[in-house]
Amino acid sequence: MAAVLGIAAMVTVVAATPSVAQGDKNSISGKGLPRDRGATTLTTNGQTFLEINAANELVHWSRSGESYAKQLRGWGWGGTRTITTLDEQNFLEIKNDGRLSKWSWNGSWYTEAVIGTGWNNARLITGTSLGQFIEINNQGELVYWTIDGSNGMSRVVRGSGWGATRSITGLDPYLFLEVKGDENHSVSYWVNEAGGVTEYPATGSSFTGVRLIAGGDIDHFTVVATDGNLVEFAWVDAGEESGYRGTVRGWGWGGTRMIG
């Protein structure tokens, strides 16, 4: 894969009410969710995410006012099965041949370190910080992985029975979002606590209209909706009405293969 520093471009903001899908709410309830855990390690501080588009280009998107600036960072990514951001400079890739690679940006290009093989068994992964990511494998196990400074890895199984989960999205080392595989694609928050993970259902929330999700930090995540809209969800602290509220940031994302 070659990498290139691309020319920045702007995505026009849609001045319209956000809509994830017909009949879906534009907010996700956060009532009862414990969020005050002191300082946490953020992923991208809610400012950036990565895309692999229909042309198999790797694109870096960074916040610019109310829009995002586009930077082409690579091409020839057709052999990629999934990507997930670890922080603003690093991301993970699982290739179609089962290799797990960590990519690091040096200001001009990405360098690759293959840190694992045999990852065909991984069904879902999501980054939570530079040194941590979560996997759901084909056996339905929920596994927390730690990456050390030499790119060695260790794993801890934190749960089982996750075979029906549709997607997981890391927001920080303590919190991730699950979209279930039920008819309504209902949403739950999961908090990483001593001895396991604890579920906090987002009562009444449905993500039937969400196709792709990328976490930013504890306060932000971004989705590509089935109607091709790019929608950013940001945390609003409003007492009993607290939760994530959606704002449309762009449209025409129907050809996007993956974000992370």
Image (cartoon, helix red, strand yellow):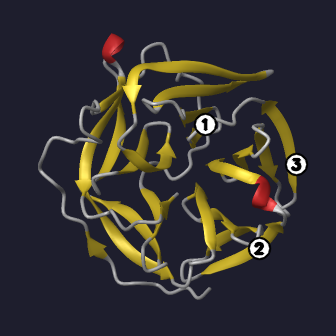
Type of amino acid under label 1: Thr
Of pointers 3 and 1, the one earlier in the residue sequence: 3
Q: Which residue is denoted by mark 3 in the rendering?
A: 154
Vertical relation: 48 (above or below) 58: above
Examine the image and state in which quarter residue 110 appears. Answer: bottom right
Assess disc 1: are there few (<14), some (14-19) or many (≥20) residues with their C-alpha within 10 Å of its C-alpha: some
Could you tell me which residue is drawn at 58 percent across and 65 percent down? Answer: 89
At mark 1, the secondary structure is loop
At mark 3, the secondary structure is strand
Examine the image and state in which quarter residue 210 appears. Answer: top left
Tell me: 92 left or right of 171: right
Q: Which residue is denoted by mark 1 in the rendering?
A: 165
Label 3 to label 1: alpha-carbon separation: 23 Å
Q: Are marks 3 and 1 in contact (CB under 8 Å)?
A: no
Label 2 to label 3: alpha-carbon separation: 17 Å
* Residue at the left extreme of this rendering: 15
Examine the image and state in which quarter residue 26 appears. Answer: top left
Type of amino acid under label 3: Ser
Type of amino acid under label 2: Ala
